[in-house]
Image (spheres, grey):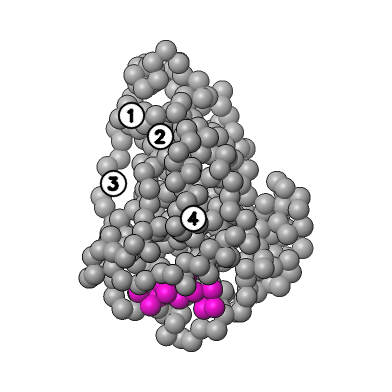
């Protein structure tokens, strides 16, 4: 049985509250699994060897079981600008459905349009992540939900300010009671409601997923070849970090961005865990829905997927403290184009999104 599938099944056997404690695969194991996946994969629609790439049921903690009331409340809170210091920002300001649940900017804009140092990550499939944020400083969706409100650089309202805005509204109070009976309007229920909504932003039915499920017409020959290159450690070497099923290993890598050579370079994960190899290392983002989430990398330095592929083909720009997974790639122009074509096939057809009606 595939090692990664065995690990997932083992995780399924434990209570959901323990899932977050399942260890992230080590760098060496990820490399071995990538090689194993390429060696044993049969690139035919619906083949059993492909099933590891299908997204499982969305996980959630036992103390925050998703319900319609919780999701709808979280959706309102996510889009409510009253939960910010100036009353003009919401979670959706930076994580907009118009821009693949990101913002389309090179780096984020915060309180009073302050230019921030990192790109806004998409919230697609954050429900599956074992660790949150570019530097992994938050463990769960509930843990990260209030972070922007607390930050003076972002929504700048604080937990008390956000709670005051909600408690002053009788309709919100009733909605909280319906969603979390007897628990009141607290920082905990506020974060749980937002996390419940975020768990509905899921990518699991791209043309790639349809092909994996057996639809032979879902992918073109070029896209299938791009997938072969993606999982081949001797060619694209992409799956070593962007592994099944969510196209990320939830681990941290210095991929050699040119910005790391700057004197005031962002140290990424190193600021949280001061281990040398983590200097300039950031969490590998999911590649799902990537066609909708440009620009790319934590500093927004790649405008297109072609730029992303070229960066990796050159083995990175900065060679300082480079991740062992990053190496110069032997790819011709056709192979680079095939990789881009495959990654675009990981994006779903865009659907209309209905905005919530907020309490008066």
Q: Residue at x 41, y 69 (%)?
A: 41
Q: Residue 24 placed where, x, y %?
A: 58, 50
Q: CA distance from mark 2 to mark 1?
A: 8 Å
Q: Which residue has dot 2 on it? A: 196
Q: Earlier in the sequence, mark 4 or mark 1?
A: 4
Please determine whether, in this image, residue 79 is positioned above or below residue 320: above
Instruction: Kindly check if marks 4 and 1 are in contact, taking CB atoms under 8 A apart as contact.
Output: no
Q: Residue at x 70, y 56 (%)?
A: 278
Relative depth, front residue between 229 and 79: 229
Q: Earlier in the sequence, mark 3 or mark 4?
A: 4
Q: Which residue has dot 4 on it? A: 4
- Mark identifier at residue 67: 1
Q: Residue 177 placed where, x, y %?
A: 37, 16
Q: Which residue has dot 3 on it? A: 353
Q: Is residue 122 magenta?
A: no
**Most frequent secondary structure within the magenta stretch:** helix
- SS class of the residue under badge 3? loop
- Which residues are drawn in magenta? 224-236
- SS class of the residue under badge 4? helix
Relative depth, front residue between 268 and 88: 268
Instruction: Kindly check if marks 2 and 4 are in contact, taking CB atoms under 8 A apart as contact.
Output: no
Specify the quadrant that holds the C terminus. Answer: top left
Q: Earlier in the sequence, mark 2 or mark 1?
A: 1
Q: CA distance from mark 4 to mark 1?
A: 30 Å
Bin the neighbour count of mark 4 within 10 Å (Cα to Cα): few under 14, some 14-19, many 20 and up.
some
């Amino acid at each position: 049985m595939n090692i990664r599938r065995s690990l997932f099944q083992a995780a399924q056997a434990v209570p959901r509250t323990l899932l977050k404690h399942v260890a992230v695969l080590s760098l060496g194991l990820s490399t071995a699994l990538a090689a194993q996946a390429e060696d044993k994969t049969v690139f035919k629609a619906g083949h059993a060897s492909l099933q590891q790439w299908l997204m499982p049921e969305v996980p959630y903690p036992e103390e925050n079981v998703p319900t319609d009331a919780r999701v709808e409340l979280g959706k309102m809170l996510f889009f409510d600008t009253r939960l910010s210091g100036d009353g003009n920002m919401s979670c959706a300001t930076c994580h907009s459905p118009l821009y693949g649940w990101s913002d389309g900017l090179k780096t984020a804009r915060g309180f009073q349009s302050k230019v921030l140092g990192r790109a806004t990550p998409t919230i697609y499939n954050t429900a599956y992540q074992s660790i949150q944020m570019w530097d992994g400083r938050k463990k769960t969706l509930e843990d990260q939900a209030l972070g922007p409100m607390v930050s003076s650089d972002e929504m700048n309202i604080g937990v008390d300010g956000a709670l005051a805005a909600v408690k002053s509204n009788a309709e919100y109070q009733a909605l909280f009671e319906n969603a979390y009976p007897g628990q009141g309007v607290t920082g905990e229920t506020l974060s749980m409601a937002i996390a419940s909504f975020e768990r509905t932003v899921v990518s699991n039915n791209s043309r790639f997923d349809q092909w994996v499920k057996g639809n032979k017409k879902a992918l073109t020959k070029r896209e299938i070849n791009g997938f072969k290159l993606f999982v081949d450690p001797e060619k694209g070497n992409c799956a070593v970090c962007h592994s099944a099923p969510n196209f990320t290993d939830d681990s941290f890598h210095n991929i050699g961005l040119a910005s790391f050579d700057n004197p005031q370079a962002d140290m990424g994960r190193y600021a949280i865990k001061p281990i040398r190899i983590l200097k300039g290392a950031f969490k590998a983002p999911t590649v799902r829905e990537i066609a909708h989430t440009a620009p790319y990398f934590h500093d927004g330095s790649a405008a297109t997927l072609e730029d992303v592929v070229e960066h990796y083909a050159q083995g990175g720009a900065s060679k300082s403290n480079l991740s062992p997974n990053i190496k110069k790639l032997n790819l011709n122009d056709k192979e680079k184009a095939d990789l881009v074509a495959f990654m675009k096939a990981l994006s779903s057809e865009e659907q209309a999104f209905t905005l919530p009606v907020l309490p008066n």
